[in-house]
């Protein structure tokens, strides 16, 4: 059959693209199925690392990752709080599409349905052993019931694709302070059952209000219920004393458990999600890191996190796995100073700019809320360099599917785009052209980046935490704002009045993307 000349050119181009994709996949698979480690910091801003501009302290281990791989200047998470970003990262779908994906409460159920095809499911399908170590904060147990703290915590990460898990079940400013592994609370004594609730269990139960003088770290707002290790938390719990951990030891435990997982799976491909708690409140780094920076425990926790990254990389080096391991470093949202505790983060901030040149931080749909450090390293495979391509944690699911040659079900990863070429630092490879950013609940507050244009929509006409250097506050703003990030990366000048057609176009694109229920074609 003879095709028209234009169609012949199209088919030739299509064949060329197919060959390029096949060769790229073969190159990747030829590397003996590289291990994949995703290291997610907590509440880390764009400017919180020395490789992203911090000058008053150093992060040499993460800097080394950046120097040997791709350091992205437009790397994002999908939401400006932890639970929705983690949901989107593991499901490849924007969290605002599913109600109930805001910050999970202490007794929250698992918010990822067991029927959902997840990133760990993908990696298992590709032949990987899968593990998660660190902060979970996606709930445990059945909907309507929540966690059975004294029995089997099911469903758990095991039911959504993880072969192994060792977790902080919620986040450490929420109760309980225990570890969960293989769907049970570690070291729990049946004679001392664990109870977790929303109401004070007894009139004489010590709290951050009634026993404030006993606290080693005072609270500033909220965070004043049950006291453990001299710190009051959100929520109430009793019992489980043998299972409780000391805050200062968290980072050491994450290193121990991450290294154990790597050791156990050194002879087969593995996927590890290392979800650090640093630098989320309460910021209580180990004693050996306290005072190592001029900025108090917040920056001390950054240095501690950098140490944990170095320890994991040492293990890869010792086991001769470095050249066969793809490492991604990212954050779940931008920075915040006073997030409930008086830890001198504000008083000792000095000249440090946690969000770098960007406006906003945690809880915000401005750039500082979701534009964070994003580094991809694979020794000998990814060239060193700085990339301006737009990539997001939500894209890791589809990108890893491409890189491992694994098929994605049609109804999975609804908003995860293939940016694998950009992640690998391939010349002329493009990242995403558009991105929706959400705050915690995603109820109408969205940022929408298209190219270098940025539209913000505040449904309630108020924005939280506009200046990360200050305490949290709601400030009145116009419902819609428009910024040109190429000339105004700090979102200082709202130019919507002078560019009404562009604003209308972006509003329509945002509305369509939300209404369609997916953005991955």
Image: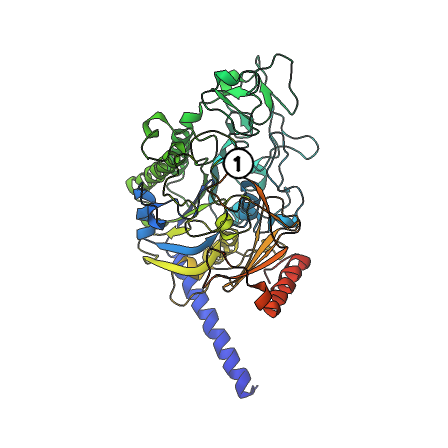
Q: Would you say 409 lies left or right of 311 here?
A: right
In the displayed structure, 86 sits above or below 172; it is below
In the displayed structure, 354 sits above or below 381; it is above
Task: Say whether residue 3 is visible.
Answer: yes
Seen from this angle, which residue lies furthest right?
144
Q: Position of residue 28 (x, y in %)?
A: 40, 57
Task: Say whether residue 33 is visible.
Answer: no
Q: Quadrant of residue 110?
A: top right
Q: Quadrant of residue 521?
A: bottom right
Residue that carries the numbered disc 1 in the rendered image? 136
Which quadrant: the N terminus?
bottom right
Q: How is the image coloured?
A: rainbow
Q: Residues within 10 Å of mark 1 (few under 14, many from 20)?
A: many
- Circle count: 1
Q: Residue at x 35, y 37 (%)?
A: 303
Q: Would you say 102 lies left or right of 188 here?
A: right
Q: Position of residue 143 (x, y in %)?
A: 68, 35
Q: Position of residue 236 (x, y in %)?
A: 60, 22
Q: Would you say 456 lies left or right of 73 here?
A: right
Give the structural element (helix, strand or loop) at label 1: loop
Q: Position of residue 266 (x, y in %)?
A: 37, 41
């Amino acid at each position: 059959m003879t095709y028209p000349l234009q169609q012949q050119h199209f088919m030739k181009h299509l064949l060329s693209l197919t060959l390029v994709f096949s060769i790229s996949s073969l190159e990747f698979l030829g590397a003996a199925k590289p291990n994949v480690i995703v290291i997610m910091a907590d509440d880390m801003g764009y400017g919180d690392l020395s490789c992203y501009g911090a000058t008053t302290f150093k992060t040499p281990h993460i800097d080394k990752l950046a120097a040997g791989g791709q350091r992205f200047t437009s790397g994002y998470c999908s939401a400006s709080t932890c639970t929705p970003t983690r949901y989107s990262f593991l499901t490849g779908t924007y969290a605002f599409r599913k109600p109930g994906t805001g910050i999970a409460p202490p007794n929250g159920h698992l918010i990822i349905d067991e029927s959902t095809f997840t990133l760990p499911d993908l990696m298992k399908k590709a032949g990987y052993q899968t593990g998660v170590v660190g902060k979970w904060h996606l709930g445990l147990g059945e909907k309507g019931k929540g966690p059975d703290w004294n029995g089997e915590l099911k469903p758990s990460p095991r039911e959504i694709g993880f072969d192994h898990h060792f977790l902080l079940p919620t986040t450490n400013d929420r109760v309980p302070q225990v570890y969960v592994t293989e769907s049970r609370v570690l070291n729990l004594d049946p004679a001392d059952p664990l109870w977790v609730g929303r109401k004070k269990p007894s009139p004489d139960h010590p709290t951050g209000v009634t026993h404030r003088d006993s606290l080693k770290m005072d609270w500033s707002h909220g965070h004043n219920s049950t006291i453990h290790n001299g710190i009051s938390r959100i929520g109430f719990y009793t019992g489980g004393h043998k299972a409780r951990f000391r805050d200062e030891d968290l980072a050491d435990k994450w290193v121990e458990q991450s290294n154990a997982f790597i050791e156990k799976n050194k002879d087969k491909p593995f996927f590890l999600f290392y979800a650090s708690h640093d630098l989320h409140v309460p910021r209580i780094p180990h004693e050996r890191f306290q005072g190592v920076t001029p900025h108090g425990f917040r920056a001390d926790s950054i240095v501690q996190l950098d140490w944990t990254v170095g320890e994991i990389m040492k293990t890869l080096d010792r086991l001769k796995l470095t050249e066969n391991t793809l490492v991604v470093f990212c954050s779940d949202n931008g920075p915040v100073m006073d997030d409930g505790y008086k830890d001198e983060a504000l008083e000792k901030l000095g000249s440090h700019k946690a969000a770098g040149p960007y406006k906003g931080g945690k809880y915000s749909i401005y750039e500082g809320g979701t534009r964070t450090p994003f580094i991809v390293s694979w020794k000998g495979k990814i060239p060193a360099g700085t990339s301006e391509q737009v990539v997001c944690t939500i894209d890791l699911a589809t990108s890893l599917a491409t890189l491992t040659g694994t098929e994605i079900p049609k109804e999975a990863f609804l908003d995860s785009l293939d940016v694998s070429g950009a992640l690998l630092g391939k010349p002329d490879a493009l990242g995403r052209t558009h991105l929706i950013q959400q705050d915690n609940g995603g109820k109408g507050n969205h940022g929408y980046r298209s190219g270098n244009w940025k539209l913000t929509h505040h449904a309630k006409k108020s924005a939280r935490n506009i200046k990360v250097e200050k305490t949290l506050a709601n400030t009145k703003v116009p419902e819609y704002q428009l910024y040109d990030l190429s000339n105004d990366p700090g979102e200082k000048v709202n130019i919507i009045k002078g560019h009404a057609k562009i604003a209308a176009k972006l509003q329509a694109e945002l509305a369509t993307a939300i209404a369609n229920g997916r953005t991955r074609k």
